[in-house]
Amino acid sequence: MNSFASIVESVSAFLWGWPMIALLFGTHIYLTIILKFPQRKIFTAIKLSVTKDKDGSGDVSQFGALATALAATIGTGNIVGVATAVALGGPGAVLWCWLTGVLGIATKYSEGLLSIKYRVKTSDGTMLGGPMYALERGLNMKWLAVIFCIFTAVAAFGIGNTVQANSIAMIVNETYAIPTYITGLFLSISTAMVILFGIKGIARVCETLVPFMAIFYILGCLFILYLNAPFLKDTFVLIFESAFSAKAAGAGFVGTTIMMAARFGIARGLFSNESGLGSAPIVAAAAKTRNPVRQALVSSTGTFWDTVVVCALTGLVIVSTIIAYPEVDHTQGAALTKVAFSKVPFGSIILTIGILTFAFSTILGWSYYGEKAVEYLGGKKYIFVYRIAWIIAVFLGSVVNLALIWNIADSMNALMAIPNLIAILLLSKVLVKETKKYLWSGNLDMADTEEIPTIIK
């Protein structure tokens, strides 16, 4: 078993190494260029995300779809993952993580566009979409669509379920001494009460939970940065110097290099915002929108909030706290977050509530991703069984050791990206054509007249 775990860990490390980083980061840059920097429209996109599209077709509002995607995307990785990147790559990793988010907006835009362009609906009007339908309908590559769905269904139980439940159970146990099985039981019941109602139930909860958790955490981080104000200038200098210099200045960061900062910062940014992985477009397809570009813009704001805002704030909190308290051991990765937040008033409360809400929302969002992957593979008859399995897995994740499961899910998560990126890159001409039609020509309010195909599931 130990040998198997070692092999899985090695595979995971390889998949999230330089080949995947180069593929994803290169795609971000390529799409940014051919789509003429869609990042310029981020404020238009934010406005659209909170505007109801009464003339659009879909199951949930644009904001509901975005909230569900953000629920799945903003998880413990935004808090603990950033600390790990800083511990391994130095403070310069924060800047590389941020740059990944800025460029990743173009990829998230592209995924959202294709999800609407190639979505279908069932006989009862339910919308279905995502990379599997772009592969099948846009490229006639159903076999690759099947592979994507297999990877998604497996990865969902790990990264989107058990490891999130485990994070909640562990922090509740450490903070309040509540047994993990009690937390697991409560989480299972709470999850069941939401996901058994399908996407509309998930979206309703996420529309309330996501704004609360994001605003609470952002305000908490800003409060900590206010307390650390005397050290902010040094924080920015240290981050920028460490990102582009072989020598990391101050705070005891010795031995980090440009390559280390770039590798761990980019990897954390990619893993955190999921731009290019193919998960978010699955729920984007359910949005009520009048044309593909409107939802593409709304989808792109997910990467903005996740990485450009949340991950950046987390990184600033961690690095400024290390500068303020040089005795903090910055090499401890996950433990670094807890230590950094505990150094300021209310920091532990901000961290605890942040992890609880982020992790629970991820469980809800990823349940929909996995469910749609299973539906594509076998039809609606397996949805209820999948939901029951999901609820059981939440409990199991709360009470068992997940080192092996994490690495398996990590590998599957990386493998999801390959079919999705194939779809994006091979359909790049479609992306340019649709963007030119609606965005570059100023026709964002124009309705798409193309009929959405109906399929039997």
Image (tube, rainbow, N blue to C red):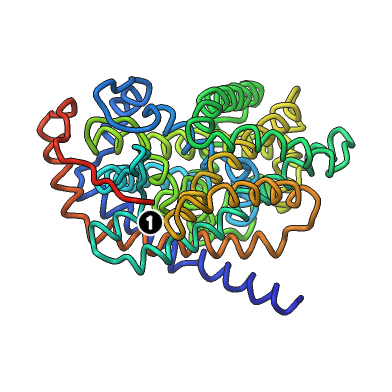
Q: Residues within 10 Å of mark 1 (few under 14, many from 20)?
A: many
Q: Give coordinates of residue 449: x percent, y percent.
A: 14, 36
In the rendered structure, the answer to whether residue 19 lies left or right of residue 3 reads left
Vertical placement of 314 versus 24: above or below?
A: above
Q: Is residue 339 left or right of residue 424?
A: right
User: Can residue 221 be seen in the rendering of this structure?
Assistant: yes
Q: Position of residue 436 (x, y in %)?
A: 12, 40
The residue shown at (43%, 69%) is 19
- Depth check: 130 or 194 in front? 194
- Residue position marked by numbered label 1 in the rendering: 25
Whole-percent x, y for residue 331 in the image: 71, 53
Q: Residue furthest bottom?
A: 3
- Viewport quadrant of the N terminus: bottom right
Residue 85 showing in the rendered view: no
Residue 184 to residue 56: above or below: below
Tell me the residue at 52%/37% (across/down).
Answer: 198
Instruction: Residue 63: give x, y in percent of width and height.
Output: 41, 27
116 lies left or right of 446: right
Q: Nearer the viewer, residue 374 or 24?
A: 374
Number of marks: 1
- Compare residues 428 and 245 and report the one nearer the observer: 428
* Secondary structure at numbered mark 1: helix
User: Looking at the picture, which amino acid does disc 1 mark?
Assistant: Phe
Residue at position x 55%, y 34% from top? Answer: 197
